[in-house]
Image (tube, rainbow, N blue to C red):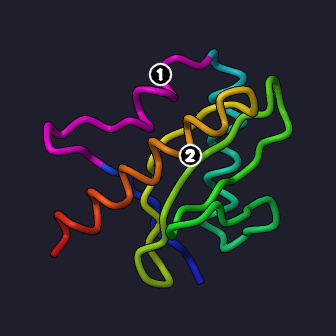
Protein backbone atom coordinates (compact mmCIF):
# COMPACT_ATOMS: atom_id res chain seq x y z
CA UNK A 1 0.00 0.00 0.00
CA UNK A 2 1.24 3.48 -0.82
CA UNK A 3 0.74 6.05 1.89
CA UNK A 4 0.14 9.74 1.29
CA UNK A 5 2.21 12.14 3.41
CA UNK A 6 0.92 15.67 3.99
CA UNK A 7 1.99 18.53 6.24
CA UNK A 8 -0.18 19.79 9.08
CA UNK A 9 -1.03 23.46 8.63
CA UNK A 10 -1.98 25.56 11.64
CA UNK A 11 -4.88 28.05 11.62
CA UNK A 12 -2.61 30.63 9.92
CA UNK A 13 -1.64 28.18 7.16
CA UNK A 14 1.87 27.64 8.53
CA UNK A 15 3.59 24.24 8.60
CA UNK A 16 5.65 23.56 11.75
CA UNK A 17 7.29 20.65 9.90
CA UNK A 18 8.38 22.86 6.96
CA UNK A 19 9.68 25.49 9.37
CA UNK A 20 11.85 22.86 11.08
CA UNK A 21 12.98 21.26 7.82
CA UNK A 22 14.01 24.63 6.35
CA UNK A 23 16.45 25.05 9.24
CA UNK A 24 18.37 21.86 8.41
CA UNK A 25 21.43 21.64 6.19
CA UNK A 26 21.09 19.83 2.86
CA UNK A 27 22.52 16.51 4.09
CA UNK A 28 20.19 16.35 7.09
CA UNK A 29 17.23 17.38 4.90
CA UNK A 30 18.10 14.53 2.51
CA UNK A 31 18.11 12.06 5.42
CA UNK A 32 14.66 13.34 6.45
CA UNK A 33 13.41 12.99 2.85
CA UNK A 34 14.63 9.38 2.82
CA UNK A 35 12.77 8.67 6.07
CA UNK A 36 9.58 10.18 4.60
CA UNK A 37 9.97 8.05 1.48
CA UNK A 38 10.16 4.96 3.69
CA UNK A 39 6.92 5.97 5.41
CA UNK A 40 5.25 6.42 2.01
CA UNK A 41 6.30 2.84 1.21
CA UNK A 42 4.60 1.59 4.42
CA UNK A 43 7.94 1.02 6.19
CA UNK A 44 7.42 1.86 9.87
CA UNK A 45 10.45 -0.04 11.20
CA UNK A 46 11.93 3.07 12.90
CA UNK A 47 8.63 4.39 14.29
CA UNK A 48 7.24 4.37 17.83
CA UNK A 49 4.02 5.73 19.25
CA UNK A 50 4.57 8.53 21.78
CA UNK A 51 0.94 8.79 22.94
CA UNK A 52 -2.21 10.62 21.96
CA UNK A 53 -2.12 9.26 18.40
CA UNK A 54 1.29 10.82 17.66
CA UNK A 55 4.21 8.82 16.28
CA UNK A 56 7.94 9.47 16.27
CA UNK A 57 10.08 8.39 13.34
CA UNK A 58 13.73 8.12 14.34
CA UNK A 59 16.57 9.03 12.00
CA UNK A 60 20.04 7.77 12.91
CA UNK A 61 21.94 10.84 11.83
CA UNK A 62 23.38 13.95 13.45
CA UNK A 63 21.85 14.73 16.84
CA UNK A 64 19.27 11.96 16.49
CA UNK A 65 16.66 13.64 14.32
CA UNK A 66 13.00 12.83 14.83
CA UNK A 67 9.93 13.34 12.65
CA UNK A 68 6.54 13.57 14.38
CA UNK A 69 3.29 12.62 12.68
CA UNK A 70 -0.25 11.37 13.11
CA UNK A 71 -2.09 8.77 11.06
CA UNK A 72 -5.43 9.82 9.60
CA UNK A 73 -6.79 6.42 8.62
CA UNK A 74 -4.60 3.74 7.08
CA UNK A 75 -3.24 5.64 4.08
CA UNK A 76 -2.68 9.25 5.21
CA UNK A 77 0.14 10.59 7.37
CA UNK A 78 0.06 14.15 8.68
CA UNK A 79 3.53 15.58 9.43
CA UNK A 80 3.37 17.58 12.66
CA UNK A 81 6.98 18.64 13.21
CA UNK A 82 10.52 17.52 13.71
CA UNK A 83 13.36 17.81 16.13
CA UNK A 84 16.27 16.05 17.77
CA UNK A 85 16.82 13.73 20.71
CA UNK A 86 17.89 16.66 22.90
CA UNK A 87 14.55 18.48 22.48
CA UNK A 88 12.45 15.34 22.31
CA UNK A 89 10.05 16.06 25.20
CA UNK A 90 9.30 19.62 24.06
CA UNK A 91 8.92 18.49 20.43
CA UNK A 92 6.47 15.74 21.44
CA UNK A 93 4.38 18.27 23.36
CA UNK A 94 4.18 20.55 20.32
CA UNK A 95 3.32 17.60 18.05
CA UNK A 96 0.53 16.48 20.40
CA UNK A 97 -0.88 20.00 20.38
CA UNK A 98 -0.77 20.15 16.57
CA UNK A 99 -2.43 16.74 16.28
CA UNK A 100 -5.27 17.74 18.60
CA UNK A 101 -5.74 20.94 16.59
CA UNK A 102 -5.74 18.97 13.31
CA UNK A 103 -8.42 16.58 14.54
CA UNK A 104 -10.55 19.40 15.97
CA UNK A 105 -10.46 21.47 12.77
CA UNK A 106 -10.98 18.44 10.53
CA UNK A 107 -14.49 17.88 11.90
Mark 2: which secondary structure? helix
User: Which residue occupies 45% across, 54% down?
Assistant: 96
User: Which residue occupies 17% across, 63% down?
Assistant: 105
Percent x, y of residue 9: 26, 46
User: Which residue occupies 65% across, 54% down?
Assistant: 56
The CA span between labels 1 and 2 is 19 Å
- Picture quadrant of residue 78: bottom left
Left or right: residue 15 compared with residue 96: left
Instruction: Please rate how many residues cluster around mark 2, counting C-alpha atoms within 10 Å: few if below 14, some from 14 to 19, many from 20.
Output: many
Q: Residue furthest right?
A: 60
The span picked out in magenta is 9-24
Of marks 1 and 2, the one in the foreground: 2
Check residue 36 for magenta coloring. no
> Which residue is identified by label 1?
22
Percent x, y of residue 27: 72, 22
Mark 1: which secondary structure? helix
Percent x, y of residue 88: 66, 37
Instruction: Please rate how many residues cluster around mark 1, counting C-alpha atoms within 10 Å: few if below 14, some from 14 to 19, many from 20.
Output: few
> Which residue is identified by label 2?
92
Question: In the image, is residue 85 above or below residue 23?
Answer: below
Left or right: residue 10 compared with residue 43: left
Q: Quadrant of the N terminus?
A: bottom right
Amino acid sequence: MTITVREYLDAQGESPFAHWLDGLDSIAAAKVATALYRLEQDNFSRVEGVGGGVYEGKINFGPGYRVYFGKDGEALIILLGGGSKKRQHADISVALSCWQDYKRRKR
